[in-house]
């Protein structure tokens, strides 16, 4: 009787395995990659990702991308590059960016922002450099022998600093708007801005991804600091277009005041020359 029971169990297991390896009826949708511009992964060579709020990126080499914040460009022309040093499930990259914020300061001076920059202020030539290390870890890596797509879950940590070079005389006051104070800290008295941040990104369901980030900024370690947090849900129409919506929160604590601000955000991303697509794969499972 015991042998018969074992035989039935083994037979059931063999049938179950054979069924699992057979094509499964019904539609199965793969997840879209949940990597963001904040992660250590660079875009593939030849691809161009255009974004309204995040960095727009172009893969100019297999492990290097050029990037720029296009919305900021008219006020602070900027360019940067990211190089990926390590790959696969743990990725390490370095990001180096250059900004010329003098154009935006001159525009603010002539546009009536007297509470920030009076018309009598002298605006020098400012060259701001940002350097950061980015480490990303795939928390649930895809097994090489698994045909079923596992949802992404990616944790990213970054650390870096800003410094600025200045040419010409200046006498403009510190900018104290909640989103400008920490970003303009390096303009004054050879100060440096130090920052560190975390991001968790992953797949939610079908065409939906999420990203949640938090950043800490410290100015010269002198007691002035700021926090920023951003959360977004990303909806992918297909592999070439996505819409993101969420929030951006700011907290600033400096010598003169404390500011808290929360704002909704919407972003659009277009991917040009994007060669990876969702396809019907083995066992009726979509693949990238």
Image (cartoon, rainbow, N blue to C red):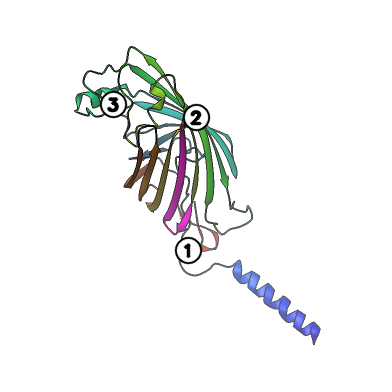
Question: What are the residue bounds of the magenta stretch?
Answer: 202-218
User: Mark 1 sits on what residue?
Assistant: 28
Estimate how packed mark 2 is, as few (under 14), some (14 to 19) or many (20 or more) residues with alpha carbons within 10 Å. Answer: few
Q: Is residue 194 above or below residue 34?
A: above
Instruction: Label 2: state its secondary structure.
Output: loop
Image position, residue 165 (x, y; %): 41, 17
Q: Are marks 1 and 3 in contact (CB under 8 Å)?
A: no
Point out the tag, 1 or 3, that comes first from the N-terminus. Answer: 1
Who's the residue at 46% across and 60% down the image? 29
Q: In front: 202, or 230?
A: 230
- Indicate the position of residue 227 as horizontal and vertical percent values: 43, 40
Q: Which residue is mark 2?
A: 221
Q: Which residue is mark 3?
A: 104
Q: Nearer the viewer, residue 25 or 137?
A: 137
Please say whether residue 83 is one of the residues in the magenta stretch.
no
From mark 2 to mark 1, how far is it between C-alphas? Answer: 52 Å
Sequence-first disc among 2 and 1: 1
What residue appears at the point 40 percent right and 27 percent down from the top-left corner? 185
Local crowd size for mark 3, using a 10 Å CA cut-off: few (<14), some (14–19), many (≥20): some
The prevailing secondary structure element of the residues shown in magenta is strand
């Amino acid at each position: 009787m015991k042998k018969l029971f074992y035989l039935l169990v083994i037979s059931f297991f063999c049938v179950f395995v054979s069924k699992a390896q057979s094509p499964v009826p019904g539609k199965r949708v793969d997840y879209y990659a949940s990597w963001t511009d904040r992660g250590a992964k660079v875009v593939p060579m030849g691809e161009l990702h255009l974004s309204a709020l995040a960095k727009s990126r172009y893969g100019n080499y297999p492990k290097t991308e050029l990037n720029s914040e296009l919305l900021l460009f008219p006020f602070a022309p900027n360019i940067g590059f990211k190089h990926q040093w390590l790959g696969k499930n743990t990725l390490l990259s370095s990001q180096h960016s250059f900004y010329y914020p003098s154009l935006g300061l001159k525009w603010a001076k002539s546009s009536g922002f007297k509470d920030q920059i009076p018309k009598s202020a002298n605006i020098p030539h400012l060259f701001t450099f940002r350097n950061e290390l980015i480490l990303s870890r795939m928390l649930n890596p895809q097994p090489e022998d698994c045909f079923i797509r596992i949802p992404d879950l990616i944790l990213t940590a970054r650390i870096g600093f800003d410094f600025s070079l200045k040419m010409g005389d200046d006498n403009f006051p510190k900018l104290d708007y909640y989103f400008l104070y920490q970003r303009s800290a390096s303009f004054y008295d050879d100060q440096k801005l130090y920052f560190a941040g975390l991001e968790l990104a992953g797949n939610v369901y079908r065409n939906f991804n999420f990203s949640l980030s938090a950043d800490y900024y410290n100015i010269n370690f002198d007691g002035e600091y700021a926090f920023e947090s951003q959360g977004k849900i990303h909806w992918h129409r297909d592999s070439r277009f996505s819409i993101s919506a969420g929030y951006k929160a700011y907290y600033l604590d400096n010598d003169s005041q404390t500011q808290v601000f929360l704002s909704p955000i919407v972003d659009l991303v277009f991917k040009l020359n994007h060669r990876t697509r969702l396809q019907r794969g083995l066992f009726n499972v979509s693949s990238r």
